[in-house]
């Protein structure tokens, strides 16, 4: 299986993140009905920053003026190819929010994010963002859609620990 390179950005405003509720049916959408940040797959020749800026503009209509590269998240799954995701945050943007063809965009207070339908691993990196953790590498291993193992900066832990 071929690996995938992606970006994900959590855009911040008024102690909220802009979240995308993936409710529109896309073929084989592993994120269907989940709440995620905005981002997507690299196109040929793109740097992580090129991908980030393009995906944010396409999905939200917003233009990022600055951003912070927060970490690399590696997703390993028995159902999909390995994914390497560049994780960003930004609170410096302009433009008007537009409709997204992948779902509904909504500003959600950070304190309410964990009440949403999220991937288990997303809760881990969202907590790292909340703690303003230094740049990190997070590995998330899923089996049958369930998080079974994590590794933060190379230190492995089973989910039942």
Image (tube, rainbow, N blue to C red):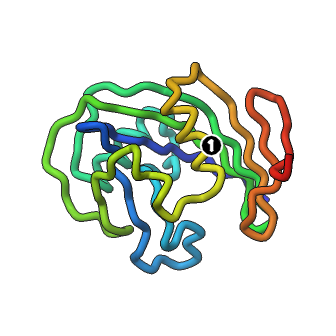
In the rendered structure, the answer to whether residue 137 lies left or right of residue 100 reads: right
Q: Say which of 131 and 18 sits in front.
A: 131
Q: Mark 1 = which residue?
A: 124
The part of the image, by quadrant, that contains residue 1 is bottom right
Q: Position of residue 10 (x, y in %)?
A: 40, 42
Residue 47 visible to the viewer: no
Q: Residues within 10 Å of mark 1 (few under 14, many from 20)?
A: some
Q: Is residue 22 visible?
A: yes
Identify the residue shown where x is 85% and y is 52%: 160
Task: Residue at 38% x, 59% y: name it.
Answer: 20
Left or right, 55 with respect to 143, comes to: left
Q: Secondary structure at mark 1?
A: helix
Residue ID at (48%, 39%): 46
**Residue visible at 58% across and 49% down in the picture:** 122
Instruction: Residue 129: give x, y in percent of width and height.
Output: 51, 32
Q: Residue furthest left?
A: 96
């Amino acid at each position: 299986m071929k690996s995938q390179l992606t970006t994900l950005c959590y855009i911040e405003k008024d102690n909220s993140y802009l979240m995308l509720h993936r409710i529109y049916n896309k073929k084989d959408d592993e994120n269907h009905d989940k709440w995620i940040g905005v981002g997507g797959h690299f196109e040929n020749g793109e740097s992580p920053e090129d991908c980030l800026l393009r995906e944010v503009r396409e999905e939200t209509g917003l233009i990022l003026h600055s951003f912070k590269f927060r970490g690399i998240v590696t997703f390993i799954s028995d159902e999909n190819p390995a994914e390497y995701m560049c994780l960003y945050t930004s609170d410096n943007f302009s433009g008007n929010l537009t409709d997204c063809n992948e779902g509904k965009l909504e500003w959600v207070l950070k304190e309410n994010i964990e009440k949403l339908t999220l991937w288990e691993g997303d809760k881990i990196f969202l907590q790292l963002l909340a703690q303003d953790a230094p740049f990190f590498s997070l590995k998330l291993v899923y089996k049958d859609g369930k998080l079974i193992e994590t590794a933060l900066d190379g230190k492995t832990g089973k989910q039942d620990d």
